[in-house]
Image (cartoon, grey):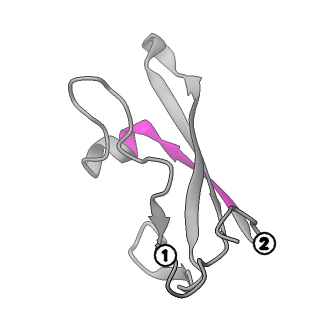
């Protein structure tokens, strides 16, 4: 009853330079700070305008976070993050 049963799915591709600019890359390891189970709240344009808000509940949560490409100089270039809806736990469940 509390497992992952996605009904909605959004796949976003991030450029590592953008993630670095937002402080979402660990300086020591070079890894993105986005993790599985992170929640997607909204999508905004580059000008800061709201494109889509994510209704919570049920919410969309990262189920896969994978580097996808290397750019010039063999540095990580793109990060693919899959967000999916998951079932709500029964009331009183811990």
Q: Exactly how many numbered labels are in the figure?
A: 2
User: Residue pushed farthest top?
Assistant: 73
Density class for disc 2 (Cα within 10 Å; few <14, some 14-19, many ≥20) is few
Whichever of labels 2 and 1 marks the residue nearer the N terminus, that label is 2
Judge from the rendering whether residue 86 lies leftward or rightward of residue 55; answer left or right: right
Report the span colored magenta. Answer: 10-18
71 w.r.t. 32: above or below: above
Report the predominant secondary structure element of the magenta stretch: strand
Q: Position of residue 35 (x, y in %)?
A: 44, 47
Q: In what element is the residue under mark 1?
A: strand
Q: Residue at x 49, y 16 (%)?
A: 72
Closer to the eye: label 2 or 1? 2
For disc 2, the marked residue is 7
Disc 2 is placed on an element classified as loop
Residue drawn at (64%, 69%), measured in percent from left and top? Answer: 2
Say which residue label 1 marks.
42
Q: Give the residue drawn at x 35%, y 43%.
A: 33
Residue 27: quarter of image? top left
Q: Position of residue 25 (x, y in %)?
A: 31, 38
Task: Give left or right: position of 60 versus 40.
Answer: right
């Amino acid at each position: 009853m509390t497992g992952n049963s996605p009904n909605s799915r959004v796949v976003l591709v991030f450029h590592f330079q953008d993630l670095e600019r937002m402080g979402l890359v660990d300086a020591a390891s070079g890894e993105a700070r986005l993790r599985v189970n992170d929640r997607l709240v909204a999508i905004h344009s580059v000008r800061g305008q709201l494109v889509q808000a994510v209704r919570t509940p049920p919410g969309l949560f990262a189920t896969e976070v994978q580097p996808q490409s290397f750019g010039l100089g063999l540095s990580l270039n793109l990060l693919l993050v899959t967000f999916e809806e998951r079932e709500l736990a029964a009331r009183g469940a811990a």
